[in-house]
Each structure stands twice: as C-alpha cells, then as structure tokens.
Amino acid sequence: MTEEDSKQETKRFCLCGCGQEVKGFNHSKWPYEPTKFVKGHNQSKERHWQWHGGRKLNAAGYVMIQCKGHPRATKEGYVFEHDLIMEQIIGRYLQEGEFVHHKNENKQDNRPENLQLVTKAEHNSIHHKGKPKKKRNKK
C-alpha cells in the first residue's frame, strides 16, 4: 500500500451530507474524537436547536415556509404560507397584483376557508371600509 492509499483511507466527510472533507479532532472530549462536521454544519437545519421544520414567523406575524426556488421566495428561500395554500387551491402561482386576504384578519389562520384571493384595490377596500380618507397637506 502506498502513502497515497493510506491518506485516502483516512479521509472523513461531513455527516451533514455536504461532501466536504473533515479534518481534525474534537479537543473538548477526552479521549479526542475525530471531528464529525465541517465547522457550523452541525447547527444546520434539523440539527439546529431553533429549527422548526422550515417554518417561522416574520416580523409582521405571518407564517413563512421554506420553499427555495419559488418565484416569490425571499433570499433565504421563505414564502408566505397563505400564498402557498392559495396557489394549491387555484393550481398556479399568484400573479402580480393578486393578494391573499385573511377573512378573519388572523395572520396565522391559513385554513383554505379563511383565505380569499383579491386584487390590491379589493384588499384596500376591505381593510379601509368605513374609515375616513386621510387628507394630504399640499405645500
């Protein structure tokens, strides 16, 4: 066996499945154990203590679902859950100018019977019904 063969036999790869080679040992345990993950990969997705299956709330209180590759996905790959549900109901992606309205105004109630497909004008009229229009000051 050559020196090259012995080096190939000792190669270890990250257990997250990324295919990157792992080098070194875990020095926090005695006896030292071979490192199992590339730095940071043991905290990715399912192994991270804050992972909730690709589901999170955004700052406005809407449920977001991880759906990378979706036309309306954020740069992190999240899409509003109510958009995904409406797209399943209508059998296509939402078009520009289409909005999903929560009938009971509960942002986290994404049951199909609580969702309504509307235009921007319809959505504004629903939320501003009975409210006086604000006057703009002209300078």
Image (cartoon, rainbow, N blue to C red):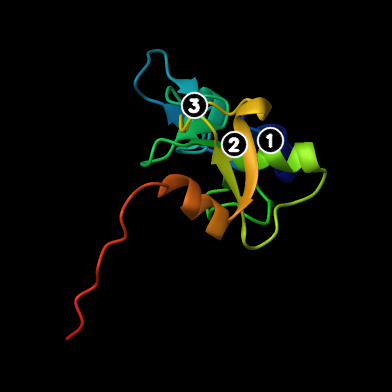
Q: CA distance from mark 3 to mark 2?
A: 17 Å
Report the residue at 58% width, 48% height from top: 77
Q: Is residue 76 visible?
A: yes
Residue 58 on image: x %, y %: 42, 40
Residue 99 on image: x %, y %: 59, 51
Q: Secondary structure at mark 1?
A: helix
Q: Is residue 22 visible?
A: no
Considering the image in quadrants, where does the N terminus appear? top right
For this rendering, which residue is in front, 14 or 134? 134
Residue 27 on image: x %, y %: 37, 24
For this rendering, which residue is in front, 22 or 109? 109
Q: CA distance from mark 3 to mark 1?
A: 22 Å
Please name the amino acid that badge 2 sits on.
Glu
Displayed quadrant of residue 54: top right
Q: Classify 10 Å Cα crowding around label 1: few (below 14), some (14-19), many (20 and above).
A: some
- Which residue lies under the disc numbered 3? 51
Considering the image in quadrants, where does the C terminus appear? bottom left
Q: Secondary structure at mark 2?
A: helix
Q: Is residue 2 above or below residue 70?
A: above
Report the residue at 24% width, 68% height from top: 135
Q: Which mark is in front, 3 or 1? A: 1
Report the residue at 42% width, 47% height from top: 129
Q: Is residue 68 above or below residue 41?
A: below
Decide which of tag 3 and tag 2 comes sooner along the chain.
3
- Which residue lies under the disc numbered 2? 81
Q: Is residue 97 above or below residue 4?
A: below
Contact check, label 1 and label 2, Cβ < 8 Å: yes
Decide which of tag 3 and tag 1 comes sooner along the chain.
3
Report the residue at 33% width, 49% height from top: 131
Contact check, label 3 and label 1, Cβ < 8 Å: no
In the image, is 68 to the left or to the right of 135?
Answer: right
Residue 3 on image: x %, y %: 70, 42
